[in-house]
Image: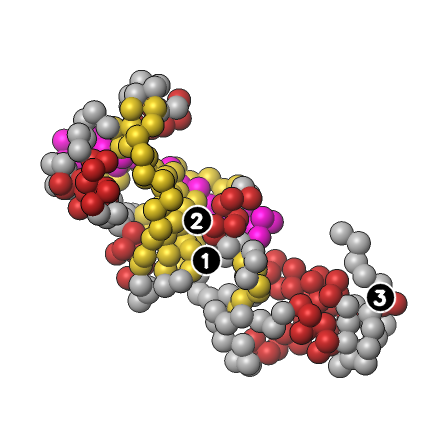
C-alpha cells in the first residue's frame, strides 16, 4: 500500500507534523485514547471518514490508513457499507456435546435471531456426502442460516440432513427454523456432536458482506457431525464465524 505523504494532507489540524511520527499514527493514538477514555463506547459507530478528515485536517487516505491500523489491532471493526465500529467483547463459542445456537448467544446475555437464506433439497456433493456418510448425489436437505447476537452477525452456517432417513424434515423446517424442534418433529429426540474440525481462512466476498467484516480478517470454519442416540448421523454442518467477534473454546 502506498501511504499518503504529508503534502497530500490539507487544512489546519490538531495533529502535528512531527519528525518521526506519521500523521496517520497520530490519529491512531488520538482515537485509541478516545476509546480508552469512554468517548466511544463498545459497539458505537465512529464518525465517517469525511468527518474525521475534517476534524484532523487531513485527507481521507490518511484517515483510512489510521482506521486500517485500528482494525488490524482489533480495536475497531469495519462493516462493509456501514462504517467503522468500536469492537465489542469477543463471544466465546464453547464446543460442547450439545452446542445449540440460541443457548450459546443467551449465555452472553444477548438475543439470538437468524435469517434463513436457503431451505431446499439438493443432491449431496462429495464433501457433504462424506460428512453424512452417504453416496454422492444422495438427496439432502440444506438449511443455510445467518445467525445474529442482538443485531450483530456472528455465524453463517450451512446445515445438511439426510432427506431419506429424516422424511418430512424439509416441511418441519418450513414450519420452524429451530433445528432441534424440527428434528424432534421427525423422530430425533436428541442429538450430540460426534466430531468438530476447525480451520481458518479469508472470507469470500459474500461471506464478508453478510458477516459485515473486511476481507483481510479471517473467518473460523467449523465442520461438525451430529449423531442421534443410536449413533446415526443426522446432520453435517459447515459454519463460518467472524474472528473479530467470535473465538472458539475447547474444554475437556
Residue 180 makes an appearance in the image: no
Task: Look at the numbered discs 1 and 2 and tell me whether their residues touch, using CB distance below 8 Å.
Answer: yes
Vertical comparison of 206 with 23: above or below: above
Residue to which mark 3 is pinned: 8
**Does 138 appear above or below 73?**
above
Residue 197 location in percent, x, y? 39, 37
* Cα–Cα gap, marks 2 and 3: 38 Å
Residue depicted at x 42% and y 55%: 153
Frontmost residue, 58 versus 176: 176
**Image quadrant where residue 126 sits:** top left
Q: Is mark 2 on a helix, strand or loop?
A: strand
Sequence order check, earlier mark of 1 and 3? 3
Residue 231 part of the magenta segment: yes
Please give the range of residues in magenta: 214-235
Q: Which colour scheme is used?
A: secondary structure
Please name the residue that numbered disc 1 is placed on.
245
Discs 2, 3 touching: Cβ within 8 Å: no
Q: Position of residue 106 (x, y in %)?
A: 28, 62
Q: Which residue is drawn at 14% across and 41% down?
A: 184
The answer to whether residue 39 is seen in the rendering is yes
Front residue of 160/3: it is 160
N-terminal label among 2 and 3 = 3
Tell me the residue that label 2 is attached to.
241
For label 1, the SS is loop
State which quadrant residue 166 falls in. top left
* Separation of marks 1 and 2 at Cα, in angstroms: 8 Å
- Residue 81 colored magenta? no
Q: Which of marks 2 and 3 is in front?
A: 3
x 58%, y 71%: residue? 46
Real-space CA distance between mark 1 and mark 3, rounded to the nearest whole angstrom: 35 Å
Residue 59 vertical position relative to residue 207 in the rendered view, above or below: below
Amino acid at each position: 500500500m502506498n501511504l499518503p505523504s504529508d503534502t497530500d494532507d490539507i487544512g489546519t489540524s490538531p495533529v502535528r507534523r512531527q519528525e518521526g511520527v506519521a500523521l496517520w499514527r497520530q490519529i491512531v493514538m488520538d482515537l485509541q485514547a478516545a476509546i480508552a477514555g469512554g468517548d466511544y463506547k463498545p459497539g458505537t459507530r465512529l464518525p465517517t471518514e469525511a468527518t474525521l478528515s475534517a476534524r484532523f485536517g487531513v485527507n481521507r487516505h490518511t484517515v483510512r490508513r489510521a482506521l486500517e491500523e485500528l482494525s488490524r489491532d482489533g480495536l475497531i471493526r469495519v462493516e462493509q457499507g456501514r462504517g467503522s465500529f468500536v469492537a465489542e467483547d469477543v463471544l466465546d463459542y464453547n464446543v460442547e456435546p450439545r452446542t445449540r445456537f440460541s443457548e450459546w448467544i443467551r449465555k452472553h446475555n444477548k438475543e439470538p435471531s437468524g435469517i434463513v437464506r436457503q431451505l431446499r433439497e439438493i443432491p449431496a456433493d462429495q464433501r457433504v456426502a462424506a460428512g453424512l456418510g452417504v453416496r454422492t448425489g444422495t438427496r439432502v436437505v440444506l438449511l443455510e442460516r445467518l445467525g445474529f447476537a442482538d443485531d450483530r452477525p456472528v455465524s453463517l452456517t450451512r446445515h445438511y440432513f439426510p432427506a431419506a432417513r429424516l422424511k418430512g424434515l424439509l416441511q418441519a423446517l418450513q414450519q420452524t427454523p429451530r433445528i432441534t424442534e424440527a428434528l424432534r418433529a421427525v423422530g430425533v429426540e436428541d442429538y450430540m456432536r460426534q466430531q468438530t474440525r476447525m480451520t481458518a481462512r479469508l472470507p469470500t466476498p459474500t461471506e464478508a458482506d453478510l458477516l459485515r467484516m473486511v476481507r483481510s480478517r479471517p473467518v473460523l470454519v467449523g465442520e461438525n457431525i451430529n449423531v442421534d442416540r443410536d449413533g446415526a448421523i443426522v446432520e453435517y454442518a459447515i459454519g463460518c464465524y467472524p474472528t473479530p467477534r467470535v473465538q472458539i473454546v475447547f474444554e475437556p
